[in-house]
Amino acid sequence: MKRLIAVVIIVLSAKAAAFAQQGLQPTIAAMRWGADYKLHVKLANDSDYVVDVRGLYHTGKDLFIDTTNNSATYYPVSLDKEFVDYIKSKRIYNDDSRADSLAQPSYKTLWSALHGNLGGGYIHFINCMVYALESQNLRLTDPILMRPSTKWKPKPMTSTYKRTRKWTYYYPNTQQLALKEYKLRKKTGDLKDLQGVPQPFIDLFLSTNQSDYEKLVANRRMREVAQIELVKLLLGAKYLGEDQIRYISSRVLIAVMKYNVNTMPSVIIFDDYNAAVALSLGVNGYKIEKIVYSDGEVVTGTELEGRTELIEALIKRINEANERVFRKKLQLYYQRKK
């Protein structure tokens, strides 16, 4: 029988984050379910937190891994210290005037620029882009992303010009424009720039009108706003010039280098296994930091070992699937260069 896995991403309170900034990264010591949908989390520093499960981030009951290699599996997890340090050292190397020009990032596409700067796979591109947008280190309303005013018209008039001539930015910045662009591109089979984007991002984008989007912004639901903005930006990716690509890439790098690695660990709750799993994104993909079982005191060690093996296998499958998405994206990029 297929297991249904309810996944919950916990964003713990600012009070706990304040402790993290003192230099120690808190770890989860225990977790238990209480009454009225309350989740009790105990940290290694003896701090206790009670969180309403209904208010947490849910990804659904089915763990979906796209076997077509068209959609990455995304978790909004913290960045691993090793990955952040890797980006910082890589950045220093790229800024070195003695660096081999062949090692420099290509700014022909947004994907190639960020892959050259970040390394890793497509999930690193997604996570870092979303983080930059969510933290507002990258703002899509920045002047450099606005199209210059011009009376120039191509002769003969092209379908692309007709479709984009009313755009204020290099990407469709309103939901009306973006949804129209998506539908037209889908009809013509031209959605390669969205290949690899997690399907929940696409679904959220498609189900959100302009009024809904403005409510998300007003309510500071920045994670959802960032996911929608990523889709809109990628719909305009092929219209970006080198200046815009360099700017976006630099803002994402700044966001990553400013990232506080001492934030609270991201915790995913696997209900079927009664497990709290602290995850981070490392150089090679998602990495399990710690697993704590709510019923660990009443279940045999053999059963807990079996659950741990299953969870580790799931994360391994996700990383392998995301790697296939990355390889497919890389192949598409090199096909374009020919």
Image (cartoon, rainbow, N blue to C red):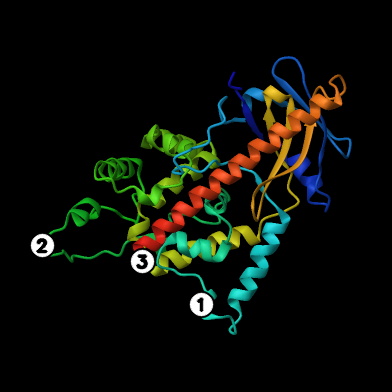
Of residues 283 and 240, the one nearer the viewer is 283
Residue 335, quarter of picture: bottom left
Q: Position of residue 92 (x, y in %)?
A: 64, 73
Label for residue 156? 2
Reading the image, the residue beneath label 1 is 102
Determine the secondary structure under disc 1.
Answer: helix
Of the two numbered discs 3 and 2 in the rendering, the one whose residue sits closer to the viewer: 3
Separation (CA) of disc 1 from disc 2: 39 Å
Q: Earlier in the sequence, mark 1 or mark 2?
A: 1
Disc 1 packing (10 Å; few <14; some 14–19; many ≥20): few
Mark 2: which amino acid? Answer: Pro
Mark 1: which amino acid? Answer: Leu
Determine the secondary structure under disc 2.
Answer: loop
Q: Earlier in the sequence, mark 1 or mark 3?
A: 1
Q: Position of residue 161 (x, y in %)?
A: 20, 57
Separation (CA) of disc 3 from disc 2: 26 Å
Separation (CA) of disc 1 from disc 3: 16 Å
| 302 vs 314: above or below | above
